């Protein structure tokens, strides 16, 4: 099996299902299409990543995923810089938001994909806390500018849905897709 992702968090989560996989990151254009809905966006990216790797490895089972944070209809991806991270955290602070992950599995002609959504409530985070968090380096490669599994765990008041989805790979749904492809 191939994990088409460079995310160490996804690899760590996948190891909870199986230790037997190879990591081959997929390089695809992640630009949202005009008026593309968040569900369609993450599902399309997961499928594109899986197809990019499956086309070069046609006999392998390929798993790919993509995660975004949604607030007020805006896709919050990885922050560009400190100002962008602070802007995102300000949008999320004291409010509920959604985390969506598209997961795709391809083996030969077998292609399946899903989108999993989790509701996350973030407590009010002060400007000082946001800046200190940025300077830890943790938010630089995280959708929405935070990682629930790390230092930002203290900012999260509650979640409804899959915790592993917020980390980047919803395990229950991913295992079902992998079992279906076996």
Image (tube, grey):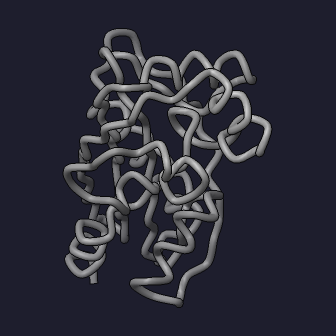
- Furthest residue to the top? 34
157 or 159, nearer to the observer: 157
| Picture residue at 43% right of the left edge, 75% below the top | 61
Q: Position of residue 3 (x, y in %)?
A: 53, 68
73 or 161, nearer to the observer: 161
171 or 161, nearer to the observer: 161
- Furthest residue to the bottom? 19
| Picture residue at 47% right of the left edge, 72% below the top | 13
**Horizontal side of residue 109 vs 128, given as left or right:** left
Q: In which quadrant is the C terminus drawn?
A: bottom left
Q: Position of residue 147 (x, y in %)?
A: 54, 49
| Picture residue at 25% right of the left edge, 70% below the top | 177
Q: Position of residue 151 (x, y in %)?
A: 61, 52
**Horizontal side of residue 140 vs 97, given as left or right:** right
111 or 136, nearer to the observer: 136
| Picture residue at 38% right of the left edge, 36% below the top | 122
In this view, 51 is above or below 98:
below
**Horizontal side of residue 89 vs 130, given as left or right:** left
């Amino acid at each position: 099996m191939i994990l088409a992702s460079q995310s160490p968090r996804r690899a760590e989560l996948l190891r909870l299902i199986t230790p037997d996989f190879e990591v081959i990151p997929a390089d695809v254009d992640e630009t949202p299409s005009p008026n593309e809905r968040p569900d369609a966006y993450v599902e399309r990216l997961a499928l594109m990543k899986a197809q990019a790797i499956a086309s070069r490895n046609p006999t392998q089972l390929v798993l790919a995923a993509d995660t975004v944070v949604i607030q007020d209809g805006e896709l919050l991806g990885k922050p560009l810089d400190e100002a962008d991270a602070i802007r995102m955290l300000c949008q999320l602070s004291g409010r509920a938001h959604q985390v969506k992950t598209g997961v795709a599995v391809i083996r030969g002609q077998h292609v399946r994909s899903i989108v999993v959504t989790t509701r996350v409530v973030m407590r009010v985070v002060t400007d000082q806390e946001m800046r200190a968090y940025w300077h830890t380096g943790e938010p630089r490669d995280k959708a929405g500018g935070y990682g629930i599994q790390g230092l930002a765990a203290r900012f999260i008041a509650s979640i409804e849905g899959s915790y592993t989805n917020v980390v980047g790979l919803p395990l229950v749904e991913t295992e079902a897709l992998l079992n279906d492809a076996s």
